[in-house]
Image (tube, helix red, strand yellow):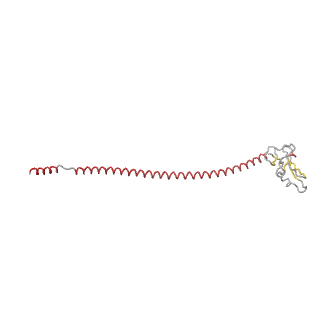
Amino acid sequence: MADENTQVAPVAGAEENATQENKGFTYYFSDPDSVNAEMHHVVITLPYELPELPWHWHIEKPDDSLKDPVWDLKVNGWVENSKDGQAAILQEATQKIEELDKKSAELDKKNAALDQANDKFDQAMKAMQQSQQVQTQQSLVLTQGLQKVAEGQEQANKVMASMQQILVGMQADQAKTATPTSDTKPAENTNKQENGGN
């Protein structure tokens, strides 16, 4: 905080405010708290440049549209002196609106980046869902194929079982035909009797 006798801001641009007629340097004094209205805004011309501005001294000229300009420390600029401070409030509100506009623009940028990230996420989710659908379809086709293979294996097993029964039946029939019958045995006996009888 600057002490009351000097203001720490350097006097840059005071030369620009110098009037060429008297080759002096123009400064503006403002004491907004003064009861004397003449102290609200005083133009001071000096023949030399101040290295530092004293308290309440400024190099900025107040706007010509202001009827009773005073320096406002909150807005760091000239405002219209009014009992209710509407000009200062308006200027402060304007600054806050500008700050909000900047923050809004920053939020818009962040939202745009977030929207892009969301779009990429949505695309990744769609790709993953499509991949899952393909995998599900492939699994279904594979399951159906395995079912058909199992059914075919079951049919093959039934055919094999039937063939085994047929083979067993055929072997049994062959075994029956290969054993000697009672008709052939007596014939041998008759030959023996005939041989023995002679």
Using the image as rendered, state which of residue 157 and residue 195 is in the foreground: 195
In the picture, measured across the screen, residue 143 lies left or right of residue 119, that is left
Using the image as rendered, state which of residue 116 and residue 84 is in the foreground: 116
Residue closest to the far bottom? 20
In the picture, measured across the screen, residue 107 lies left or right of residue 128, that is right
Where residue 152 appears, x then y in whole percent? 38, 52
In the picture, measured across the screen, residue 137 lies left or right of residue 13, that is left
In the picture, measured across the screen, residue 83 lies left or right of residue 158, that is right
Using the image as rendered, state which of residue 83 and residue 76 is in the foreground: 76
Where residue 117 appears, x then y in whole percent? 61, 51
For the N terminus, the image quarter is top right
Where residue 178 appears, x then y in whole percent? 22, 51
Where residue 112 appears, x then y in whole percent? 64, 52
Q: How many marks?
A: 0
Using the image as rendered, state which of residue 195 and residue 131 is in the foreground: 195
